[in-house]
Amino acid sequence: MNIRTLAGNGLVAALYIAVSAVIQPFGFTNVQFRVSEMFNHLIVFNKNYFYGIVLGVFLTNLFFSPMVAYDLVFGVAHSVISLLITILAGRFIKSKLGLMVINTMVFTFNMFIIAFELKLAFKLPFLFTWLTTAAGEVAVLAAGIPIMYAIHKRVNLERLV
């Protein structure tokens, strides 16, 4: 990994953590309204963002989660699996906007992983928790599409890492 990629991923992880810290009261509920999840769209522009996103999720869960052990396993697994699916989809879908929509759907569907975590940790009903966590995820990622696309038009996110 070159210095540029390392520094870019460090910045992504730091931004993920900072944004998560600001919205902490809403990021670990059964709705999971974590605004920092919009950084997941970075994977659409360059697969090298994978490391920064996963590190950001890991450290956020380590420092801010009320259920650290569960979140370090399930939260990180959710991100890794979803990001890898989006990277794979990117081999077939060349439209950035289209891939961000796919990314949103993948992360939203895969919230069953977080719902299962919350069922184990707090005995919450699985289907209802999947619905509420998925609703929070789709809201954040859908709102993130125009934001990340606009940033890309100004900064060219493909070449930052």
Image (tube, grey):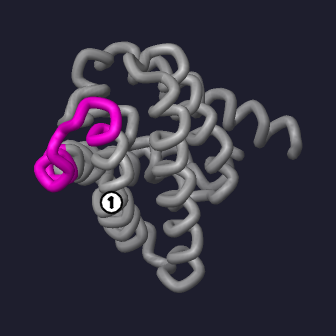
Most extreme residue toward the right, as rendered?
2
Main secondary structure found in the magenta portion: helix
Is residue 146 depicted above or below 119 in this figure? Answer: below
Give the left or right position of residue 110, taking residue 69 as reference.
Answer: left
Amino acid type at mark 1: Thr
Question: How many C-alpha atoms fall within 10 Å of the one at disc 1: few (<14), some, or many (≥20)?
Answer: many
Instruction: Confirm whether residue 68 shows in the render.
Output: yes
User: Looking at this view, is 106 or 127 the one in front?
Assistant: 127
Q: Which residue is mark 1?
A: 104
x 50%, y 79%: residue? 94
Residue 51 sits inside the magenta stretch: no
Instruction: Confirm whether residue 143 shows in the render.
Output: no
Most extreme residue toward the left, as rendered?
128
Tally of numbered tags = 1
| Quarter of the view holding residue 110 | bottom left
Q: Helix, strand or loop at disc 1?
A: helix
Residue 127 sits inside the magenta stretch: yes
Is residue 127 depicted above or below 30 in this figure? Answer: below
- Measured as percent of width and height from the top left, residue 3 is found at 86, 36
x 20%, y 34%: residue? 30
Give the left or right position of residue 70, taking residue 11 as reference.
Answer: left
- Measured as percent of width and height from the top left, residue 132 is found at 14, 45
Quadrant containing the N terminus in the rendered view: top right
- Measured as percent of width and height from the top left, residue 99 is found at 42, 70
What residue span does the magenta drawing correspond to?
A: 118-132
x 54%, y 33%: residue? 72
Most extreme residue toward the bottom, as rendered?
92
x 34%, y 14%: residue? 22
- Measured as percent of width and height from the top left, residue 142 is found at 24, 53
